Image (cartoon, rainbow, N blue to C red):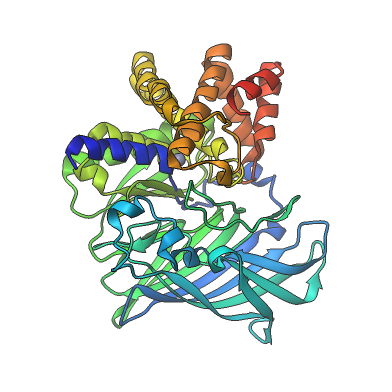
Amino acid sequence: MNKKSLIIISVLFLIIIGCTRGEALGKEILKDEDLKSLNLEDMTEYRIDVELNKKNNKLYTGWQYTTFTNTSKETLEEIYFHLYPNAFKDLEDAPILMKGLFTDPMSYDKGYIDILEVSADDRNRDLQYSVTGKDDTILKVILDKPLEPNKRIELFLGYDAKLPNVKERFGYGLRTMNFGNWYPILCVYDEDSWNLEPYYELGDPFYSQTANYKVNIRTPKNMVVASSGSIVNENIVGDEKIYEIEGEYIRDFAWVASPDFKIRESKADNTLVKVYYLDEKNTTLKTAMDSAVDSIKTFNGLFGEYPYSQYTVVITEFPSGMEYPTLSFISNDYFSNGTKEILEQVIVHETAHQWWYSIIGSNQVKEAWLDEALATYSEVLYNREVYGEEKARDFYQENISNGFEYGKRYLGDDQTVNKHLSEFSGWDEYGILVYTKGAMFINQIDKSFGEEVLYRILKEYYKEYKYQNAKTEDFIRICEEVTGTNFNKLVDTWLN
Ligand SMILES: [Zn+2]
């Protein structure tokens, strides 16, 4: 494949796949008023000890305490967790990007998570459980005493797991090990009851709630770990290194390990920005760092302040960008095969997800457009603030409106943007509708009401839904309140 095709694929992937990012947080920045929407006594807590197997560090063992309050009005007899690593048991429907191109079925070495123990009362009371759902991606814990509303429970889970040999959110390449969606994370109980969706191959099919994390990671002593949250301690004991990591008010926790990582640091307003890299050149590293720093500063001004003390960009073997709280995975391919512009665009997009996905969450299975369209249009806003109106218009034209004109040929009659992941025919349709047409909707607001009004909408949305999960109707309500205009027609035109 020639270089241009690779760039096109990279762009397509960037457009289509999305991003994840992680976060580190800082009590010193979090303000009381930021937390008023949260009932801190009910906050879910994860305490996880994870150890890489000494003989084969693609295997790991986890000891996890999860403390959970039943904030619903129902008495719960079961509690559910996602077991995302099991989506990698069977190559055929494993969520692997560009599977056909890069994954050889003969050499595929699967990933999985085996539950060894489920208990309560500090491991004194075993609980019954079953592993269920598509590809065994759901753990159902059967409570021996039903959990009444407002009651709290601590559950223990013990597990063995393994990374697959794929350069994925969860998997490894030659030099990096990616631990995205690697531990049992609580399913969300909302007004629809438990959300037990599988790990779809399409999109970033996740939905979670803000929680506090304390994670201890034991690795061989030469391993360098980049993670969500903040590393509060690193100790070498014998031939092991123990990382103590804390993350407050974050909705997931991801990490990446490599013996080869080096670290650069900079500052963006009140946030320490770290870039973990392998052997990238100084010039492209500078682009990566500048893009991360400028994004944080720009979005602090436009949307409201990033509330955590750290933001980490980790350059890793993964074919795209992926957002986790306070942490973004960025493909090392963008450094070797891409251009400076593409690298910058991916980092800006993933950083925007810190606001739209991480701090404000949403159900990315049911309403993928909500965070993706905002993250995509945030790229335009970044260009406007950093390079000026003309560059922003060109950027919009090239990446969004031309992209939609070109991509329309892949669309059928149904051009609905706001629909469930299972209703998209594949990556092409998903990318064109969720990212491109979704961003065109935000552009329509920008054009019709002006940038100051759009910024007021985004600030208001951020203020009201920080640390919560928002829905399309919440965003639209804020649009209507700020503009004083009924949005029914716009929603019908662009989203439905
Ligand atoms: Zn994205």
Q: Residue at x 43, y 63 (%)?
A: 232
Q: Residue at x 47, y 43 (%)?
A: 426
Q: Image height check: is 477 above or below 234? A: above
**Horizontal placement of 136 versus 469: left or right?**
left
Q: Residue at x 70, y 21 (%)?
A: 488
User: Which residue reaches farthest bottom?
Assistant: 124
Q: Image height check: is 477 above or below 185? A: above
Res 458 seen here: yes
**Camera-nearest residue between 179 and 296:** 179
**Camera-nearest residue between 132 and 122:** 132
Q: Position of residue 323 (x, y in %)?
A: 44, 47
Q: Image height check: is 151 above or below 361? A: below
Q: Position of residue 428 (x, y in %)?
A: 43, 37
Q: Position of residue 86 (x, y in %)?
A: 49, 67
**Horizontal placement of 445 versus 172: left or right?**
right
The number of numbered badges drawn on the structure is 0
**Horizontal placement of 141 versus 244: left or right?**
right
Q: Quadrant of the C terminus?
A: top right
Q: Residue at x 37, y 57 (%)?
A: 168
Where's ligand 1: which quadrant?
A: top left
Q: Position of residue 178 (x, y in %)?
A: 37, 61
Res 290 seen here: no
Q: Quadrant of the N terminus?
A: top left
